[in-house]
Image (cartoon, rainbow, N blue to C red):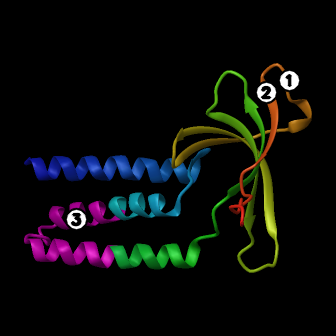
Amino acid sequence: MNKFHISLYSIFIISAVIILLNRYTAFHLTDYRVHFFFLFFAASSFAVIFGHLFNKLKDNKSILLTFIVVGALCFLKAFFTWGGDWKTQTQLYRNVTNNNKSIDLQLRADKFAFGYKKRVIEIYNIAPFMQWTTDIDTTAIDNSEWNRVDLYVNEMKLPKQE
């Protein structure tokens, strides 16, 4: 097995695991572009692996065409199924010992309605585009563990005009 196959299998495994974690666990990719990136590499590497198994993708031109077709299909899938991202409106609490943990009020626009869905969740920021989210009941907050901050994240501050 050559280095191309090993790297292709590695790309497939890593990207597929991240997509499956995002779909079936509390792990959450917060940016749609990052989600599309991992979806594209999972699907395209799977298609190329599948093509290699049946000896169909032998030259670079057919592999490039496969990437283009898979990219177009991923774009169409994202366009028709994307429900919107949850956006933090207010950071209600921040953890005393770990600044990467917070309790946030988030909103998401309804796709075909004129309103918003809202949720209050505990967020553990893993990376700038990755979070671990957990539903939480704010009526039983331990004040020794959490500080109330009420930080309005989604407010836009305009510069002073003179």
Q: Secondary structure at mark 1?
A: loop
What residue lies at 46% left-to-right and 79% top-to-bottom? 76
Which labelled disc corresponds to residue 48? 3
Q: In the rendered structure, are the residues bearing label 2 and label 1 in contact, judged by CB atoms less than 8 Å apart? A: yes
Q: Is residue 142 above or below residue 82?
A: above
Answer whether labels 2 and 3 touch (C-beta < 8 Å). no
Residue 96 image-quadrant placement? top right
Q: Position of residue 136 (x, y in %)?
A: 79, 39
Residue bearing mark 1: 143
| Residue occupying image coordinates x 24% and y 74% | 66
How many marks can you see? 3
Estimate how packed mark 3 is, as few (under 14), some (14 to 19) or many (20 or more) residues with alpha carbons within 10 Å: many
Q: Tell me which segment is drawn in magenta.
A: 43-70
| Residue at mark 2 to residue at mark 1: CA–CA distance | 5 Å
State the separation of the CA atoms marked 1 and 3: 53 Å
Residue 109 in the image, given as x and y percentages of width and height: 73, 69
Q: Is residue 77 magenta?
A: no
Q: Is residue 51 magenta?
A: yes
Disc 3 on helix, strand or loop?
A: helix
Residue tagged 2 = 146
Of residue 77 and residue 145, the one placed in the foreground of this image is 145
Specify whether 86 is left or right of 92: left
Amino acid carrying mark 3 in the image: Val
Q: Earlier in the sequence, mark 1 or mark 3?
A: 3
Q: Nearer the viewer, residue 19 or 86?
A: 86
